[in-house]
Image: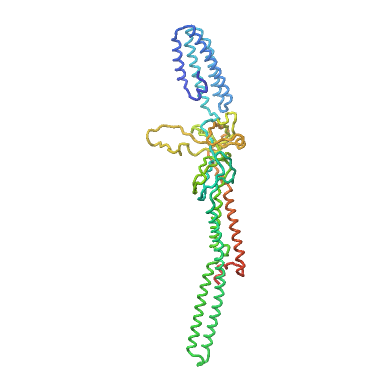
Amino acid sequence: MITMKQLSVSRVSASEIESSLTTGASRILRMPPCPEVIEERNRMAREIHDTLVQEFAGISLHLEAADSVDNAARENISEYVARARELAKCGLESTTGRKSKLRMFLFAALLLAIVAVVAAYFFRLDYPYLSTEDAYVHGNQILLTPRVTGTVVAINADDTDLVQKGQPLVVLDDSDANVQLLQAEGALGDTMRKVCQYFVSVRQSKANVEARGIDLAKADDDYHRRTTAQSGTVSAEDITHARQSADGARQTLEATQQQLAAAQAMVVDSDLAHHPLVLQAEANVLDAHLALQRTTIKAPETGYIVRRNVQVGQRVTPGTALLAIVPLNQIWVDANYKEQELRNVRIGQPVSLTSDFYGRSVKYKGRVVGLNPSTGAAFSLLPPDEGSGNWIKIIQRVPVRIVLEGKQLEGFPLRIGLSMRTVIDTHDRRGEKLTKVSTAQAVYSTPIYSDEWSRANELMQNLVSTNLEALSSLADPPLSAPTYGQAQK
């Protein structure tokens, strides 16, 4: 027998049902009128009557549950159902004679045609619940890769293991990193001492300028005294020598002033702790210390290990895939609905979900958070080219992202790739079809890498403070550079 469910799925037309039933009735009536055949016909008639009564009762229940059916349509469908029941009763009563057999099957064909029309009309209405089994669980898969080159000496987790955020997973040999850190620390101390010499050279050049200024003043006094003496008391040769000495002292002063300017240019607008050469040496220390910390590869998130590819003794480089971490609290469902089904789907609508993993006894609650701006086939490996060859219309599917409640996932965790059955309730259609607000905050983040920078910076500051204390006693006043304006005076 053809039921309402089969009619709603296959959309069988009334003419096709009537034609098939009429053909079957003709074949049965051509059979010899033996008692067995008559009894079989009566049994079939009773079965048709009972089935139609059940289906009409189901249609009545659907009509009572459907909010979108108007009163006129409800009265028309009720009238069709009443007429069909009467015809079914007449068809059952008319099965007593041989001539009424054909009439009975014709009545049955007419009844099923009416059922098909009613079912098509009902399901053409705006039914608020959309269901699909083309839905699968997706989630973040964090691929763990090294940031420095090294040899693997330890692996602290394997597939299916639970790891916590910040837990060391893979350890690389740190011998080379320790050597580079020691070299960077030594270079920092050496650089700070050289820069300290620049500040001492500035004070030394200032002293030389003052000394050369005194020499110039003395030479000018000698020359002035000889030129103002009484005629004949100072020879012309002495006057010439005095003038030459004054000129030489003046040139020496100018050279010393240039040396002072050069020394001041090395330290102008800076102090020892913030000198460019010292900052560069500090950066080298930071880089070496970060490289040392990165020999221990930690888990950025809490999750389960999958696809471990790394082996002990393997030489790895930045970008090498070691393993993956799946946080089961960061999963969602992508339900692929047909394009004609998404007319009334809105963001925020509630969704009921079931999984084959737990069965229909476990029902998840979720909500629609977004619809993809493209179909699933648009970004496939081989996207369709509608402009070439013979064109065939293919119904496209659009992924709908659904998030689940976290408390349910704690009790019944899902796995990536599991199939789901989703039912979207589209009664509330006040939401947006597409996301209208951009996200200002980070969707996912981890603090473990910023902690590495904090530890490296703390080590570098300690080294700078130690070297400053050692060098502060070498000069008085303290080691500080003049401003640019002071250097020009």
Residue at the (55%, 75%) spot, across then down: 208
Name, please, the residue furthest toward the bottom.
Answer: 232
Q: Which of 158 and 88 is in front in this view?
A: 158
Q: Where is residue 98 in the image (x, y as percent from the top left)?
A: 48, 7
- In screen coordinates, is 309 left or right of 465? left
Tell me if residue 292 comes above or below residue 42 in the rendering: below
Q: Nearer the viewer, residue 396 or 82?
A: 396
Residue at the (58%, 62%) spot, across then down: 273
Kindly indicate the quadrant of the structure image that contains residue 61. top right
Q: Which of 333 and 350 is in front in this view?
A: 333
Tell me if residue 27 comes above or below residue 319 in the rendering: above
Q: Position of residue 5 (x, y in %)?
A: 52, 23
Q: Looking at the rendering, in which quadrant would you find the C terminus?
A: bottom right
Q: Position of residue 440 (x, y in %)?
A: 56, 46
Tell me if residue 412 comes above or below residue 33 in the rendering: below
Q: Nearer the viewer, residue 143 or 4?
A: 143
